[in-house]
Amino acid sequence: MSQPPNQPPQGGFGTPQDQPHQGPPPQGPPAQGPPPQGPPAQGPPPQGGFGAPQTPAPGAQPPQSGYGYPQQSGYGYPQQPGPYGQPGPYTQPGPYSQTGPYAGPQQPAAGYGYPQQAGPQPPYPGEPTPPPGGGSKNPFKGRPALIIGAAVTALLVIGGTVWAVSSGGDDKKPVAHESQDGKPTGSPTATAPVNQGDGSGDGRDETEDLNAGRKPGESKVLWYKEAPDAPGAGAQAPGMWITDKTAVKAAYKQLVAYNVGDGKPTWDAITFPAKICAVTKDKTADDKIVVAYQNGTGDNSRCNLLQQVDLDTGKKGWSGKLEEGGLFDDTITVELAISGDTVVAGRSMSGTAYDVNSGKKLWEKKKYGDSCYPSGFAGGERLVAVSSCNVGADTQHDEVQALDPATGKAKWTFKVKKGWKVERTYSVRPLVLFLKKESNNAWNMVTLKPDGTYRSQVQVDEDYAPNCSSVSLGAGLTDCTGIAADANTIYLPTEKKSGANSIVAISLTTGKERWRTKSPSDTTMLPIRTTGSRLFAYVVPKYDTGGQVVSIRTGGSRHKTYKLLQNPQGTAKIESSFYSKDFAYVDGRFFLSTTSLTGDDEAKEKLMLAYGK
């Protein structure tokens, strides 16, 4: 087969596999192994007592991705690719014949692994696997806000043409108003709290010292907090923000804030009238965030009330209401993204941008071009929009745009090959996209240049296992941890199958492996972030062994791990039972928090844990 000029080479290892899956999917990484008299290998230890892992109550949200526990494998978890040497997308007949013109001021992108379906092929070992039930087939990136049945979809497609939805909405600005309202050293001791997660008191129970029996060389527990009460059906605990002074966490209806060094509340907890339903993962340069919460507690409530908060002071800034966008463009779920001084609130099929400081409405991102509807936004160092185009037609595809935060205008547009959907942005600068092919659950990772043209696709045949929330539960484009990137490399954890896993450094120029390093323990090691020529990583604990924070040199030829913190064995039981977690390493302190509450009243739930020297 002839190949278009300037395209990646045909075939070869690492290209996304197109074979259909047969047989049950894997259930995530195996357990770390039960401790003596401890929990079974495939579940958390039994409940009861201080520090015991939590068991979800009936109807509660399942654990997202705890290592040592069954892992959710929804969208965003890279599925198993095929073995090296399997046919790649460029060996398929005619992969470029259906591309069509590229939208926007963009050069035709190289195919980068967007194969067309070439009919059934025989199964093979290690083929791509579908997520366990609940994987959304929603054409708008799996958002639960736009679950359209087949009958409805049929009504919306006439003569092979996608329906035209009125994006509706109005131009009303949110009602903005003011509400009423160095490196610190760690504390010498830390004690177990009596449910002071609401921000009142100092969260101490003087009868139990969590640092008692700490061994030489082990880090200190700076402080530990239990979660506020949650309903029996469970609740979300999204976001964790660390400033020079304060560690802030969302939990059900509350924002709570603690001094990073000693855990004392830095400001009174903010309690919302209904549950928090979305937060900005990033914060502004001056430590502001925006929170969305529901307008009621009933089944018909919407995630449409916005509140800006100063993380250092707890002062509430402007507040406002996000309007509905029109037919199927609702606020049942909302995605928030901050970039610069702009926050975007994404509905099912559009987004509205506000000035973070004043709450002034800046612009709206609605239907554009060839029936393209924005379905997701990612923020941080770049503002990215993902849109679904021509839904229901033969030319259905996704598009990725870099937006000017101040105006909402697209700087460039990248057209994704037919059949592939953008599930995650693993990084926004550099821009690394995780893509899924729903017809057979093949996956690929693609990186783009600053001008939005194709740079490379991953050519490393591996099973990767970052922590990603399920798209079917309303997760956003950036709801993943355990991934790090710098200008030329992305760092991904391999799936733990037996013994230690590894972190793999993949070149964003070639898509090939640069190096890999193995976890220093027989547990999973996860990237945290990069700084200069170093990568920080978290080595997760076992039930009876504390976790570690390690540093890895990213340059040169040696990439061994250097231990920065060895968390104490005495709190390993607590640390290992954060089955749904977020983590950060800032100014020599390691912060661990939960992202989900079970609502179980039998035992106090964990919220945050901080370690330091």
Image (cartoon, rainbow, N blue to C red):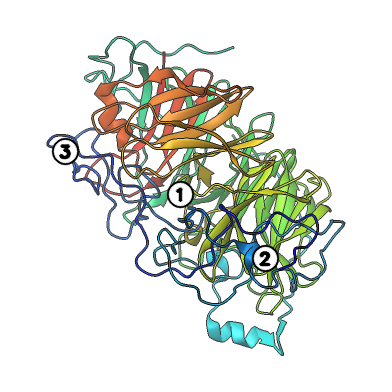
**From the viewer's perspective, is the residue at label 2 or at label 3 nearer?**
3
**From the viewer's perspective, is the residue at label 1 or at label 2 nearer?**
1
Image quarter where the N terminus lies is bottom right
Left or right of residue 419: residue 60: left
Q: Which one is earlier in the sequence, the residue at label 3 or at label 1?
A: 3
Badge number at residue 463? 1
Distance between the alpha carbons at the discs numbered 1 and 2: 32 Å
Badge number at residue 80? none
Q: Residues within 10 Å of mark 3 (few under 14, many from 20)?
A: few
Q: Amino acid at mark 1?
A: Asp
Q: Residue 4 in the image: x percent, y percent?
A: 78, 62
In terms of image quadrants, where is residue 109?
bottom right
> Toward the viewer: 371 or 599?
371
Q: Amino acid at mark 2?
A: Met
Q: Residue 294 in the image: x percent, y percent?
A: 53, 56
Q: Amino acid at mark 3?
A: Gly
Q: Residue 438 in the image: x percent, y percent?
A: 54, 68
Q: Residues within 10 Å of mark 1 (few under 14, many from 20)?
A: some
Residue receiving disc 3:
38
Is residue 256 something that shows in the picture?
no
* Residue located 70% across and 72% down the image: 94
Q: Residue 344 in the image: x percent, y percent?
A: 69, 50
